[in-house]
Each structure stands twice: as C-alpha cells, then as structure tokens.
Amino acid sequence: TPFESRHPARLNASVSIVMPLLNQRLFLSAAIDSVLGQSHDNLELIVADGGSTDGSLDMLHEHARRDPRLQWSSSPDRGPAEAVNKATQLARGEILGWLNADDLYAGGAVGAAIDALTRNKSLQMVYGQAEFIDENGATAGRYPTKPPEAGLPAFGDGCFICQPTVFLRKDAWVALGGLDTKLETAFDFDLWIRALKQWPAGIGFIDRVLARSRQHTKTITSAKRRQVALEALSLLRRHLGLAPPHWLQTHWEEICRAHPD
C-alpha cells in the first residue's frame, strides 16, 4: 500500500527518522513515542512495515491519527535493510536517523545530533553512547562504544557503533548508497565501515546516551548469531583485508550451540 500521510503541505521536516517494522506490537508504541516526544519537533517518522499480523498496523493507524508527523506503509519486503532503504527514499529531512521498532531514543537525542551536525559542517555522521535494555525496559548495561579515533582496525574487535544512536546527513546516505540488501544481518556494520573509510575525519561522537537498544530473543543479534559471525568475517576480510581469529571462534561456537550433540 502507498504510504499513508497526513502531513500538512507546509511541513518541511529538518529530520527524518525511519523505522523498519515486522510484528513488534509489544514495543512499537514506546518506540514511536520516543521519536515523536523529542524536544525537536520539526521531524517526521516514516515506518516501513513488512506485513505485520500482530496488531501493529492498528497501532500505526492510531498513532498517525493523533500525530500527523507519522507516515507508514505495509507491504512485503526482503528484510529490514530493504525496509530502511525504502523509507529513506521518501525522507524529506536533511538529517536521517534510523530507529528499530523495539528500540528507544533517549530524551534530547535528536536535538543533540542536530546541534553537532549544525555546528560542524564537515561532519557527515554522528553517533553516541547507548544503553542495553531488557524486554521490560530495565537497563541491562552499556553498549561497548568507542570514539571514531579508534579507527577502522577497532572494528576487528566488533562493532563499536550502536545503530540507533547514528544520525547522518541525507546526502551522505545517498553517497554511500544506503544499506546493502544482500546482507541478512550485518548491513549496519557494513555501512559504518564504509562511512569511516569514506570520511575518516567526518564522523563525530556525542559522549552521552542517545538511545536504548532492546535485547530480547527475537532480535537479529540474538536469533541469527551464526549469520552475524559469518557476515562479519566476510565484511572484515573485504574492508580490512583480514578478520581476527575470534570471529571464527564465534562462528564455531554458534555451530556447536545449534548442534550440541
């Protein structure tokens, strides 16, 4: 179906937040509220649903009725990477954010990102600190974030950029070509590596919590750990020329976990 929008014609959002969705009704309302409740209200939220059957669409209808900054569509897709790419094509903001339907923005996250990108025109992308939360929203630790000065080699130890904390200029997204839809799990990891390779001095760091990443059994990281390890191995080999041995160990451990006998 086409995107449903009740945006006033005069609205020209400075920030577009895109949200892929598939059967996340339990967390969806909180995720939407964390976007539309930001102190910077000159934004739009574009939700690309892949065919939810759990009542998520009714929830989208209700939120869109209450707030015209939300627009959404529902149609089959090949996964979250395609959904994000589809949503960004409709984005009218100069700055893009990407929040999954089970994650949350911290208060003031959008304003902090806009301030950083406005003050320093040489920055193409910024990211910040993140907290893990559980299914009930309780804090469960900090994401292992590192500043961009850690450089490309630091990706060999794992992804140090937490996806929902990232904001980037739409022109930068276009220049990077968006997400690689051939990847099933590590499309965000791939994008951060490509961004740091293209703009080694153009990635900024905001040293405060910008987002809360929810950990539960249905996340890609939890449900497809073996595929995460495989794709990370391939990406590190492609971009850095080698993959540290611990990624192979992770892959082997996941094989053993899947086949304990």
Image (tube, rainbow, N blue to C red):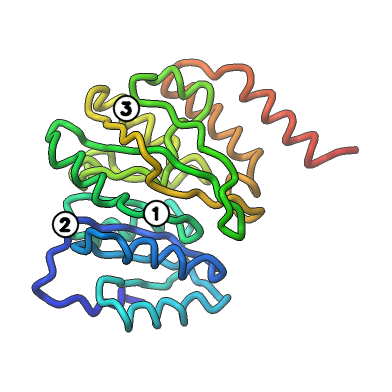
Q: Secondary structure at mark 1?
A: strand
Name the image quarter holding residue 238.
top left
Q: Residue at x 32, y 66 (%)?
A: 36
Q: Secondary structure at mark 2?
A: loop
Front disc: 2 or 1: 1
Residue picked out by circle 2: 14
- Furthest residue in direction left, as rendered: 10
- Callout 3 crowding tier (Cα within 10 Å): few <14, some 14–19, many ≥20: some
Q: CA distance from mark 3 to mark 2?
A: 24 Å
Q: Residue at x 34, y 61 (%)?
A: 35
- Callout 1 crowding tier (Cα within 10 Å): few <14, some 14–19, many ≥20: many
Residue 196 - label:
3
Residue 16 to residue 116: above or below = below
Q: Residue 98 appears at what percent x and percent y?
A: 36, 52
Q: CA distance from mark 1 to mark 3?
A: 23 Å
Kindly identify the amino acid type of the residue bearing the numbered disc 2: Ser
Front disc: 3 or 2: 2
- The image quadrant where one finds the C terminus is top right
Q: Is residue 187 left or right of residue 26?
A: left
Q: Residue 47 appears at what percent x and percent y?
A: 37, 66
Q: Are marks 1 and 3 in contact (CB under 8 Å)?
A: no
Q: Secondary structure at mark 3?
A: helix
Q: Residue 53 appears at what percent x and percent y?
A: 56, 76
Q: Is residue 86 left or right of residue 169?
A: right
Residue 54 to residue 35: above or below = below
Mark 2 and mark 1 lie on one chain; the one further toward the N terminus is 2
Q: Are marks 3 and 2 in contact (CB under 8 Å)?
A: no
Q: Is residue 204 left or right of residue 213?
A: left
Instruction: Decide which of 107, 85 is in the foreground and name it.
Output: 107
Residue 105 - label:
1
